[in-house]
Amino acid sequence: MILIVDSGATKSDWIALDDQGNQLFLTRTLGLSPEVLTREVIEDRLANNFELSENKMEVTHVHFYGAGCGTDRMKQFLKDIFKNFFPKAVCEVKEDTYAAVFATTKIGHQGIVCILGTGSNCSYYDGHQLFQKVTALGYILMDDGSGNFFGRKLLRDYYFHKMPQTLALKFASEYDLGPDVIKENLYKQPNPNTYLATFARFIVENKDHPYCKGVIDKGFQQFVNNNIMQFELATKVPINFVGSIAHYLREELTAVIERNDLILGVIRQRPIEGLMEFHKGNV
């Protein structure tokens, strides 16, 4: 049994294939980012999934693509956990950018591949190898244009009284914005980046409001400036995207891409289907 996993900060999609490439089951766990979760939390999330627990002795290969897996230390951290949980499996751990590449870009074709979901990332793929100009430093310092980026912006503007009053009242009616609740989730609970990203739903649902339009436009332009434009070939190759923010704010993202004379490629909400097709061709 082969397991293919696309893991963001919020959730992880799992597909199991047999040796002929036939799908056995599809399941989901919470996100498994090694940057923000302890070994115990990750082990619990695996153990609490019925399909994974029931089939763990049948798994021969794990292909894991995950947020927070950009360093060798984090990759090895997850490999050790997987080897313990799936004792018969050969485990491969790659950062989530590779999932985005394999889901949007054909082998041998060039492109810039971006992630705009709970977090954000950007890489250049030359058809064979992946290159990054910016080292990701996590949600506190980076993640421009992502769900947690927009969530952080909404909370700051709400508390600094920069959000229009009518919108602020609506925002407060939909979320518990008490300072103790916010600080508890940011500083004491796991996945603070995921918590921040929960507020992005508000900006998506109110994207036609002038305030939200401005926030979205500036966030995407910041992502373009700080990430995409790092590459010399930025205006010459397709710019592909995966992630919920790119998907639900497709029109706004398209406008920013076109305004910067960039070539829009594929926008895919979840890369797992593309990953399955990629691995089927390599079974």
Image (cartoon, rainbow, N blue to C red):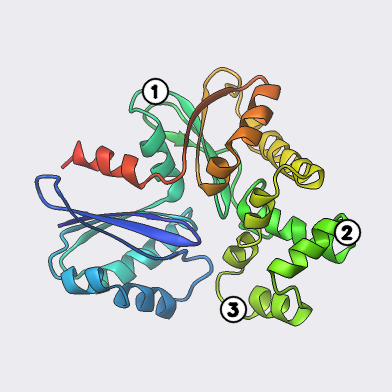
- Secondary structure of residue under mark 2: helix
Q: Is residue 200 above or below residue 253?
A: below
Q: Which residue is mark 3?
A: 189
Considering only order in the chain, which callout, 3 or 1, is on the residue closer to the N terminus? 1
**Whole-Å distance between the Cαs marked 2 and 3?**
30 Å
Mark 2 Cα-neighbour bin, 10 Å: few <14, some 14–19, many ≥20: few
Q: Quadrant of residue 64?
A: bottom left
Q: Position of residue 270 (x, y in %)?
A: 42, 46
Mark 3 Cα-neighbour bin, 10 Å: few <14, some 14–19, many ≥20: few
* In the image: residue 19, left or right of residue 122: left
User: In the image, what residue occupies the spot 12% across and 65% down?
Assistant: 58
Amino acid at dot 1: His
Tell me the quadrant of the picture where the N terminus can be found: bottom left
Q: Which residue is mark 1?
A: 109
Amino acid at dot 3: Gln
* In the image: residue 220, left or right of residue 210: left
Disc assigned to residue 170? none
- Secondary structure of residue under mark 1: loop
Considering only order in the chain, which callout, 3 or 2, is on the residue closer to the N terminus? 2
Amino acid at dot 2: Gln
Q: Is residue 141 visible?
A: no
Q: Which residue is mark 2?
A: 165
